Image: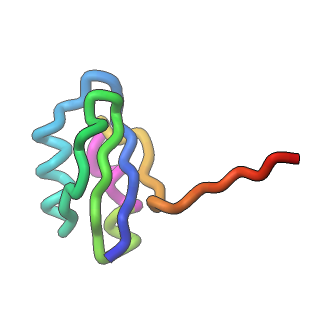
Amino acid sequence: MQKYIVSLESGADYEATKQTIEKQGGTIVDDSSRFLGMITVQMSDKDSALSLKSLNSDIISVEPDQTVSTQAA
């Protein structure tokens, strides 16, 4: 299953957002940054993950959780 980073609006209703994610078949795997407006979810269906934004107005964005690297010039 793929992991996604879900960015939330300031003052988002966490419980309502959690219910939306679970209704779409997702599981919250890390909510330690929820007070900063980010949670990590695991979902098997990419389309369901990307549709979260349209299902809950507290969700700003959904993006795949992936490794990011930088390289000095």
**Which residue is at a point 29% across and 69% down the rendered structure image?**
43
Q: Is residue 37 above or below residue 40?
A: above
Magenta stretch: dominant SS? Answer: helix
Is 22 left or right of 52, judged from the image as shown? left
Residue 52: x percent and y percent? 32, 54
Q: Which quarter of the figure has residue 28?
A: bottom left
- Rendered location of residue 55, percent (x, y): 28, 50
Residue at 35 percent of width and 40 percent of height: 38
Is residue 11 placed above or below 15 in the rendered structure? above
Q: Quadrant of the N terminus?
A: bottom left
Q: Position of residue 17 (x, y in %)?
A: 20, 44
Does residue 55 lie above or below 32 as drawn? Answer: below
Residue 71 counted in the magenta span:
no
Which one is nearer the viewer's eye here, 1 or 18?
A: 1
Q: Is residue 55 magenta?
A: yes
Residue stretch rendered in magenta on the structure: 50-57
Compared with 39, 26 (above or below) is below
Residue at the far top in the pictured view: 11
Q: Residue at x 18, y 32 (%)?
A: 13
Q: Where residue 62 sits in the image (x, y, percent)?
A: 42, 52
